Image: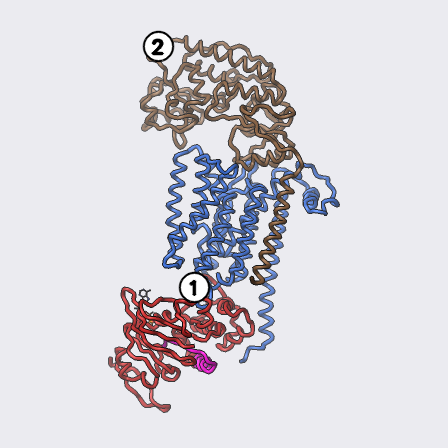
Chain colours: A brown, B blue, C red
């Protein structure tokens, strides 16, 4: 073995030992207990209530406010809209989260609906911060939303308020459902009434398929979601299916231009919805279509209002809030 | 024998060599300064004194003597977030620079880089299939492991396809690499096409980022890159010979095929390991060897280490820009290296074609 | 070291070489002459093991060239190429260092070799921007620095002015005195006549003549090798060959 090789082996071994030592040192940094991942399936198995919460999920921010746990929030995100006038620091760092600020604020938990990278999540956990994951994709229906309410209630010690909100949701849902079934649908000449939700027309016709909370909206409003049979979750639907199923009602995200549906080549062009101008653009309630939480009740109420011209009466919200949770009434 | 014994000439030659060592030392010092300064950049402001104290606390034995006036959040930010990201930049930048220098020598082509041997397309195939197919069978770092394994495997496939009668002809290897890369890229596109939902996530991997690097990921990659880089450096004489022509290298006693095999394997190993944790970062492997050749001439004794130092410095600075330029957004570092890299490249090309690369 | 070729043939689609049968003695200069494309470089590459013969065998010092490792080969032979071309940039020092790969770095011997071709002050110049003649001399110096027993040179006096041609011939004679075996391809018949001990004459890959220069470099053989008719003219120093341009 020549001298160079011997020296290089020695150098490499020495470096390996040094770096290895550093890693072990760093892995145990702070001496804090590791954080845990919390979901509605793991539920609340943490010893203490959370008091320093970072919310990367606008739906969770709203729920925490309704639960009366808003004071436990130490940071929000750039998508938060409710409650208005948020003064919390924004820790969104698209496409990831701003870990520096989260550490600097000494957070004890981060709530999120998106899939952040495994290494960012393990950074949180290694530094003793819990990660609360609230799904917003496929599989989220009203019973999941209620379980999320319960989880957030337990994490913040507001179980009683969570129960009140869930009871209000259940009463409201059955009211909406029975009212919707009772309305006169002759103007749509034919049952079942076919509806479609268009989230975005950028790079395909993005819609909500089966197993989404928006699909539940249609069900409670007694409308058949034409996108449900083809796929689950939010997806880009084949335009041929739109043309073939010709929706009678279209709910449009406010990012989509309604006149584009009538353009030549549009799969909506021949649909009764376009012919009869039954196209309804979300206004200041568009967040209800992207954020699964208790306020979605008001989205169903709005659909029923625009589609049937009726306004079902809901029980009043059980918790006294400074900012009205009903976006339809803020107008 | 007229000039031999001319002391002036000898002194001149000696001075030239000392100048080169001084350059290498200077660049190394600059790298250390860049590393330290980069520790100050981030969304949370941490005072200089606290950062220095945190450094002190990380040095065994010394830690008892430095004051601890910093908060544990500050320590976490420096030790858990900034240090692995900056050292990641160091390791990845160095591996790309060194890999570029070695590959350019083997191909005798100053506009090639480590990615041309199929490495980048292989790594993307691994990472993108892990993302799109939702694979987790190798734990939470499945994506990184897949990127590494695929990057390495595709290089092996390219190498064996290009092997003719036990020899590797540079042009043939290059063309095979390009062809296989096209093929693999088509498969990657197909994977992305089948799941449009995940295009965003894959897109960010393809553009590269140092943000997700933590100590656990950095450790094995650093070891691989250090060993591979050192062994590549030990080949510097062989690579010098090969860049003058395979036949010439053989005539002076270099085992050309063994050197090529070993170097390609080491570059594939080290760059695959790097891109597995950072995603695809372009231009470092292409531009840095040029820059070092301009500074210190074409001998790989200098080109290899200086490309490594410059690559590390460039990537750390690019990451500072990626993190710091727009608040609330981390720009993928591949975009930054591309935007800075292209004008760099054009400028050097102009200077270089002013004589140097003319046959 | 002896070089022995035994019924060596080599062919590519457009060209066939051989069969070649001759053996080169240690400490001699052998020149290969012939038209462009007659197979001179090919023969040199076969001897150096860069090309494998289709049939026959080539032995250096008794062992088959094809069985030698590049490292063994570099100890026994060096090669001055017709041209070193690379788009990479490197200095004269780099070229010299590379030729010292086998024997290890020796600054004194390196400077001595460069000094012998008169280019010691070129040590840190960029090789790729040197003139054709300067590059030729540097590659010759590199071969001297490599210091192998057998030195193969493909047209070593290309691009050189008269002064440097004569310098190179002197160097060759010195190398021969030092016991080296030189195998060259050359176009300058006058130089071949004065320098070479043995000549191989090729035409279209065929061995027209092989033997001592004195008996092989004859008008008959040359007329067979080239398309011009040769005549002898008496000069002050003796007779020289000159091509007649009458065709
Ligand atoms: N790899 C190859 N493939 C095809 N043909 C080849 C190859 N190598 C050499 N040849 C052909 O073989 C013939 C001999 O080439 P060679 O280089 O030996 O000639 P030469 O005698 O050295 O000529 P010159 O005086 O021009 O250097 C030429 O016709 C050449 O085109
Ligand atoms: Mg030739």
Residue B359 seen from this side = no
Residue to which mark 2 is pinned: A186
Q: CA distance from mark 1 to mark 2?
A: 85 Å
Is residue B77 toward the left or the right of residue B181 in the image? right
Residue to which mark 1 is pinned: B245
**In which quadrant is the N terminus of chain A drawn?**
bottom right
* Highlighted magenta segment, given as a residue range: C168-186
Task: Chain letter for mark 2, please.
Answer: A
* Magenta highlight on residue C169: yes
For the residues bearing labels 1 and 2, Cβ distance under 8 angstroms: no
Q: Residue furthest left?
A: C247
Residue B38: which quarter of the image?
Answer: top right
Q: Residues within 10 Å of mark 2 (few under 14, many from 20)?
A: few
Q: Residue furthest bottom?
A: C236
For image coordinates 38% across by 42% down, the residue present is B186
Residue C49 seen from this side = yes
For image coordinates 51% across by 48% down, the residue present is B340
Q: Secondary structure at mark 2?
A: helix
Residue B320: which quarter of the image?
Answer: top right
Nearest the eye: C182 or B89:
C182
Q: Secondary structure at mark 1?
A: loop
Q: Residue B8: image x %, image y %?
A: 60, 74
Specify the quarter for ligand 1: bottom left
Q: Residue C110: image x %, image y %?
A: 53, 73
For image coordinates 40% across by 51% down, the residue present is B158
* Magenta highlight on residue B200: no
Label count reads 2
In the image, residue A297 sits, relative to residue A77, either above or below, namely: above
Q: Residue A223: image x %, image y %?
A: 40, 16
Q: Residues within 10 Å of mark 1 (few under 14, many from 20)?
A: many
**Marks 1 and 2: which is nearer the front?**
1
In the image, residue A285 sits, relative to residue B231, either above or below, namely: above
């Amino acid at each position: 073995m020549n001298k160079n090789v011997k020296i290089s082996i020695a150098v490499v071994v020495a470096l390996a030992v040094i770096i290895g030592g550093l890693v072990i040192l760093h892995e145990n940094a702070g001496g804090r207990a590791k954080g845990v991942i919390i979901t509605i399936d793991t539920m609340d198995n943490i010893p203490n209530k959370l008091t320093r919460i970072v919310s990367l999920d606008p739906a969770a921010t709203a729920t925490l406010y309704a639960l009366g746990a808003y004071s436990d929030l130490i940071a929000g995100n750039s998508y938060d809209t409710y409650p208005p006038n948020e003064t919390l620091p924004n820790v969104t760092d698209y496409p990831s989260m701003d870990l520096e600020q989260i550490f600097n604020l000494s957070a004890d938990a981060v709530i999120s609906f998106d899939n952040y990278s495994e290494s960012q999540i393990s950074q949180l956990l290694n530094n003793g911060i819990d990660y609360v994951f609230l799904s917003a994709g496929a599989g989220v229906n009203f019973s999941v939303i209620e379980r999320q309410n319960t989880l957030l209630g337990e994490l913040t010690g507001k179980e009683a308020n969570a129960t009140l909100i869930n009871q209000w949701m259940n009463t409201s849902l059955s009211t909406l459902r029975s009212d919707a079934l009772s309305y006169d649908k002759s103007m749509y000449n034919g049952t079942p009434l076919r509806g479609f939700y268009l989230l975005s027309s950028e790079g395909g016709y993005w819609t909500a398929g089966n197993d989404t909370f928006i699909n539940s909206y249609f069900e409670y409003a007694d409308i058949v979601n034409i996108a449900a049979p083809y796929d689950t979750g939010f997806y880009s639907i084949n335009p041929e299916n739109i043309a073939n199923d010709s929706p009678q009602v279209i709910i449009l995200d406010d990012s989509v231009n309604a006149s584009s549906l009538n353009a030549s080549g549009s799969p909506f062009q021949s649909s009764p919805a376009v012919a009869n101008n039954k196209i309804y653009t979300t206004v200041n309630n568009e967040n209800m279509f992207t954020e699964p939480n208790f306020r979605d009740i008001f989205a169903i109420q709005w659909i029923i209002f625009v589609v049937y011209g009726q306004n079902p009466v809901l029980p009043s919200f059980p918790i006294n809030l400074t900012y009205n949770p009903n976006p339809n009434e803020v107008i | 024998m007229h000039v031999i014994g001319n002391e002036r000439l000898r002194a001149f030659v000696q001075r030239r060599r000392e100048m080169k060592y001084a350059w290498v030392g200077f660049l190394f010092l600059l790298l250390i300064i860049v590393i330290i300064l980069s520790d100050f950049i981030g969304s949370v402001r941490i005072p200089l004194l606290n950062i220095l104290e945190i450094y002190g606390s990380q040095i065994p034995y010394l830690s008892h003597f430095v004051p601890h006036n910093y908060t544990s959040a500050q320590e976490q930010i420096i030790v858990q977030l900034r240090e692995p990201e900056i050292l990641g930049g160091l390791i990845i930048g160095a591996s790309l620079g060194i890999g570029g220098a070695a590959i350019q020598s083997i191909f005798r082509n100053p506009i090639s880089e480590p990615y041309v041997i199929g490495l980048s397309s292989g790594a993307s195939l691994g990472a993108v299939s892990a993302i799109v197919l939702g694979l987790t069978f190798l734990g939470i770092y499945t994506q990184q492991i897949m990127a590494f394994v695929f990057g390495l495997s595709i290089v092996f496939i390219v190498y064996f396809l290009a092997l003719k009668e036990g020899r590797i002809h540079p042009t043939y290897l290059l063309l095979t690499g390009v062809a296989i890369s096209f093929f693999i890229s088509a498969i990657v596109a197909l994977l992305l096409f089948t799941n449009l939902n995940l295009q965003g996530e894959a897109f960010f991997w393809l553009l590269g980022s140092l943000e997700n690097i933590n100590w656990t990921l950095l450790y094995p990659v650093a070891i691989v890159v250090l060993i591979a880089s050192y062994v590549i450096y030990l080949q510097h004489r062989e690579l010098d010979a090969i860049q003058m022509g395979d036949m010439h290298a053989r005539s002076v006693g270099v085992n050309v095929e063994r050197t090529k095999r070993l170097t390609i394997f080491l570059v594939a190993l080290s760059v695959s390991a790097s891109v597995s944790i950072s995603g695809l970062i372009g231009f470092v492997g292409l531009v840095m060897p040029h820059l070092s050749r301009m500074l210190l001439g074409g001998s790989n004794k200098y080109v290899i280490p200086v490309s490594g130092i410059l690559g590390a410095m460039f990537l750390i600075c690019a990451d500072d820009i990626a993190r710091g330029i727009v608040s609330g957004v981390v720009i993928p570092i591949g975009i930054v290296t591309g935007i800075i890299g292209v004008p760099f490249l054009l400028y050097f090309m102009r200077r270089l074609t002013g004589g140097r690369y003319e046959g | 070291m002896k070089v022995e070729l035994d019924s060596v043939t080599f062919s590519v689609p457009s060209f066939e070489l051989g069969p070649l049968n001759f053996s080169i003695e240690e400490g001699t200069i052998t020149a290969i002459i012939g038209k462009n494309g007659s197979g001179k470089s090919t023969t040199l590459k076969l001897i150096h093991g860069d090309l494998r013969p289709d049939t026959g065998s080539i032995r250096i010092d008794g062992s088959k060239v094809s069985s030698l490792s590049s490292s063994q080969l570099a100890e026994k032979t060096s090669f001055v190429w017709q041209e070193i071309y690379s788009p990479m940039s490197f200095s004269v020092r780099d070229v010299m260092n590379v030729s010292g790969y086998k024997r290890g770095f020796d600054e004194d011997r390196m400077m001595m070799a460069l000094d012998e071709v008169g280019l010691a002050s070129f040590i840190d110049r960029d090789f790729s921007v040197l003139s054709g003649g300067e590059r030729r001399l540097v590659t010759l110096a590199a071969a001297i620095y490599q210091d192998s027993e057998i030195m193969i040179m493909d047209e070593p006096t290309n691009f050189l002015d008269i002064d440097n041609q004569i310098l190179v011939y002197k160097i060759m004679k010195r190398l021969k005195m030092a016991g080296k075996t030189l195998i060259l391809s050359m176009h300058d018949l006058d130089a071949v006549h004065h320098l070479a001990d043995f000549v191989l004459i090729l035409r279209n890959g065929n061995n027209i003549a092989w033997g001592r220069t004195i008996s092989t470099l004859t008008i008959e053989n040359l007329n067979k090798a080239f398309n011009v008719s040769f005549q002898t003219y008496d000069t002050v120093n003796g007779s020289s060959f000159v091509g007649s341009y009458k065709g």
